[in-house]
Amino acid sequence: MEIQYVIINFLILAGIILLFCRKMIVKIFRSRRERLLQQLDEAEQIERSAPPVAPVLAEEELPAPDRRKVEAERTEAEEKLAQLKLFGQRECREIHRVMIEKTKKQFFHVMQKSVAEVFSKEPYLSKMRALEASQVEEILGMIKLTSGDMAYLKRHDVLYVTLTSTYPLDPALVKRVDEATTALLASVGGKTSLWVLQDPGFIGGLRLRIGDTVYDGTVIEELYHFEKGIKRDPISSDDAAKEVLAEFAEKAKNYKSKIHTYQLGRVIQISDGICWMDGLADIMYGEVVEFECGERGMVLDIQPDRIGCVIFGEYENIESGSKVRRVGRIASVPVGEALLGRVVDAVGNPVDGDGHLFCEERRPIEFHAPGILDRAPVNRPLHTGIKAIDALVPIGRGQRELIIGDRQTGKTAIAIDAIINQKGKDTICIYVAIGQKETSISEIRERLEKVGAMEYTIIVAANASGSAATQYIAPFSGTAMAEYFMYAGKDVLIIYDDLSKHAVAYRELSLLLHRPSGREAYPGDIFYLHSRLLERSAHLSEELGGGSITALPIIETLAGDISAYIPTNVISITDGQIFLESELFHEGQRPAINVGLSVSRVGGAAQSKLMKQMASSLRTKLAQYRELADFTQLGTDIDEDTRQVLDAGARLMEALKQGRYQPLEDWKQALLLFAVSEGFADHVEVSKLYRFERALFPFFEEQYPALVERLKTGAKADAALLEGLRAALRGYNERS
């Protein structure tokens, strides 16, 4: 019974230390947090009190140069204000995160020191020593040889056994351990070499190590598991701390000493985020290991005499010769509804400063793709809200559509618009940022929050300042989160921004692991890397719930070269590509989609019948226009028919222009394309076509709600509907 009171006293002491440390750290950071919030309030007050900048003339009445100047000044002011607010929010979140981490580290350091002092005195010292005999018998009842031990014995004949205790052991107990381990190895024809050591750092109890396997009954091991439990379910308030202590005290009434089993290895070399280890003979590829300093890594290479591991955190904290232990699970991430609206890192830890994630389930980051019989045809559209995509290169749910182009051509803008357009459509969105700047990720989050899109979005951030290992696993982690929803019968849209940086990160890891390089210095399995990632996106059959993952990977090209190694790899894996051309972008065509090089292998199956009907001849007209436009650049005389084709093509190109964060509903796109292709915008100057579009939709919603309702159904337009649209458009032109 006295040992129960020891545990209860220990838990009460731990709770007091926890409460004291948290209040102390909060006091340290409170003044800094309040000062940042005060600066934000002052910035907002200046914004409200500043006189509005308004030109004497309306913007549309100003000459073009003045209008551009006013717009530029307004944009610059808005960007500066947004950056000020963003900096304050970002720094506050970072301070909050650092405060929590410092609180945890200081708490566990003080707790370990205090517990060591308590257990080094009577009557606790005698009670802990009285448990040594029972612990020895319990451990000896558990010992066995692993497959790794058997393989070691075949090469060396001798297996080392280490018995370590906090205090000097009774010679009878040492002899009991020696006899039991000798008999165990003799049964397989091996020999044993017993080492007896003493380590006061264990606080209490003893540890037996046979080969790589450790049977641990020490107090320090109990503290280790207590620390992991607090990190999984953090104590956020005084009441919560009291509840946890009361719960642990209740469990302590039936306390029994527990022996923890795990495997230990040793670090033999560490450099550039790569760790080489020996031991751990039973470890598997992709398994997680933990180092003495608390950092974790993942096994990525297994050789006969050593194991290669990538480090998730700061590898500078790991030293050669330090111990490393198996965690006992394959690399996985938390999944579930709690992730919605959050920003997490590559291993699923929150980095947005919004508190702990309470996820009950985890999924492995590597998982097999659905088989052919488990898939259903891709026949349901996923509308991006972008006219040029929904009309020309439609995307279906479960499709993999590549977005490819040079730097700064609007690839990310297309992906963010697609996420915004999923609002209210019961589609979960996941944005995986690979090698992006931290400020860029923060701006994307702020934009999604502003339009209410973060409610159904998860951001997985592996920024450029992170290690190559985190950039490597980030897309796999995002896919694991997406699979949770897909197998629950939901539709998911996942963005990989971008796989070029992912390939570079994998190349770095592979070269550090001494794997041979191939074409363009990439390892030979780079194709397999991206194929096993993208093949996990699919439309499941009805028997499996009918969920889907739609993937939009992004690839960056150099000087428009789509024949490079990585672009050709991903093009051959995906179901089509959207090619963004720098020349079109600089000409003012936004989005700068090259119709000739962009294709969707799903085609019209991923379009509504209405859009398929309205855009049936659009690609042909645009191709004809581009060919004639290139020809007429030579300055040759053109006839009237050619002039009409050029004018019609120019209007279609202008109609496909679209601003950022302005996705359009499917029926609006179909209506606009019908109006322009049927010639109802021929009287409008090309440069003013945006005015025609801006007033068209409100006019139809107010004057012809019945036509709008029929368009919203997405059904194919019959002759009566087409005639009604023509009559309504004639009325719109007469009114304007």
Image (spheres, helix red, strand yellow):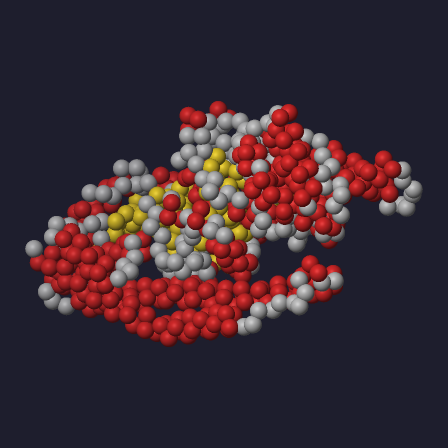
Residue 6 lies in quadrant: bottom left
Looking at the figure, which quarter contains the N terminus?
bottom left
Residue sitting at x 43%, y 52%: 342
Residue 59 at what x, y percent from top left?
67, 61
Residue sitting at x 66%, y 68%: 56
Residue 508 at what x, y percent from top left?
57, 52
Query: Is 141 in front, or is 697?
Result: 697
How many numbered discs?
A: 0
**Image side of residue 307 versus residue 655, left or right:** left
Query: Is 297 in front, or is 600?
Result: 600
Query: Is 309 in front, or is 208?
Result: 309
**Image side of residue 220 versus residue 77, left or right:** left
369 in relation to 284, above or below: above
Residue, far right: 637
Query: Is 433 in front, or is 530?
Result: 433
Residue sitting at x 38%, y 44%: 336
Residue 725 lies in quadrant: top right
Q: Is residue 735 visible?
A: yes
Residue 352 at what x, y percent from top left?
43, 58
Residue 79 at what x, y percent from top left?
58, 64
Residue sitting at x 79%, y 36%: 624
Q: Is residue 566 visible?
A: no
